[in-house]
Amino acid sequence: MQYQYLQQVKDTLEPMKPLIETTRGFMPTAEGAALAYALLNCQLDLKLPAVEIGSYMGLSTLYLGAAARKSNRKLISIDHHHGSEENQAGWEHHDPSIVDYVSNNIDTLYAFRRTMNLADLERTVIIVVSDSKIFSSIFQCEIGFLFIDGGHGEIQANSDFESWTPKITSGGLLAIHDVFENPKLGGRPPYELYLRALQMNYREVISEGSLRVMRKN
Ligand code: MG
């Protein structure tokens, strides 16, 4: 389905258009639109927050934040903001312009916060600067929606899955990015998480590019 052409999705994403076009990140339009559609149609208690793991500079957060704002839900966006393994120097997705010259670490927090401010999402998106597992250990609420797009290495991806999926309420949604069936197109861990969810009590509801969304029974 072409979610970006649905009126509901178009209306929701319209105010974000200029920012979506200029924010750096790894979220194709069709997949971002599908993500927004999934959150818009989540239909669970609005007190149940949505959670995003992996904010980077906020491109996917623009899609999710727009949907959260439209449906009056809060989105918690978690990232340590030091970049994933694949963003570090010498790796494919490294961007030297986001390395802090004093600490010599990647630091995406400033860019992310600026994106949220320009998008007028500061009352919708709760920014959490933390390792996702550490934060999960003290976060004891149920959640309605989980988007996993943090570190794509095996250890980090599995840790995100194990620490956050138990918090998804019955009927809630689990979205995973960068799911590639063909190993030539991308790394294995997100695909393995997807298979793992299907073997549990999750049923696929959306497949768009490398985005998969599943509903928990
Ligand atoms: Mg991704």
Image (cartoon, rainbow, N blue to C red):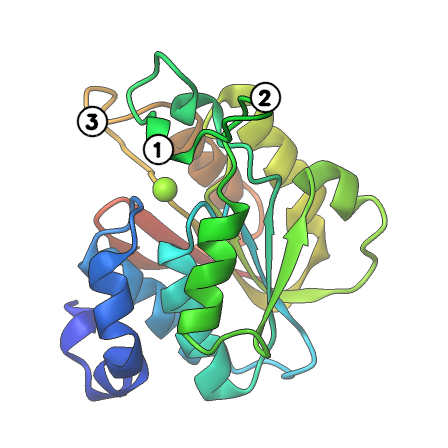
Residue at position x 49%, y 77% in the image = 68
Q: Give the answer, above or below, for where 57 lies relative to 85.
A: below
User: Marks 2/3: CA distance?
Assistant: 20 Å
**Residue occupied by mark 3:** 185
Q: Is mark 3 within 8 Å of ligand 1?
A: no
Q: Is mark 2 within 8 Å of ligand 1?
A: no
Which image quadrant: the N terminus?
bottom left
- Tell me which residue sits at (62%, 59%) in the image: 127
Q: Nearer the viewer, residue 203 or 53?
A: 53
Tell me which amino acid carries mark 2: Ile
The amino acid on which the numbered mark 1 sits, given as a three-letter code, is Ser
Residue at (47% x, 22% y) in the render: 85
Is label 2 or label 1 in front? 1
Q: Position of residue 198 (x, y in %)?
A: 47, 44
- Label drawn at residue 155: 2
Q: Position of residue 130 (x, y in %)?
A: 69, 43
Classify 90 as above or below 154. Answer: above
Which of the two discs, 3 and 1, labels the residue nearer the N terminus? 1
Mark 3 secondary-structure assignment: loop
Q: Nearer the viewer, mark 3 or mark 1?
A: 1
| Quarter occupied by residue 162 | top right
Residue 63 in picture, x, y percent from top left: 36, 67
Q: Is residue 153 left or right of residue 103?
A: left
The disc, 2 or 3, on the residue closer to the chain's N-terminal end is 2
Residue labelled with disc 1: 97
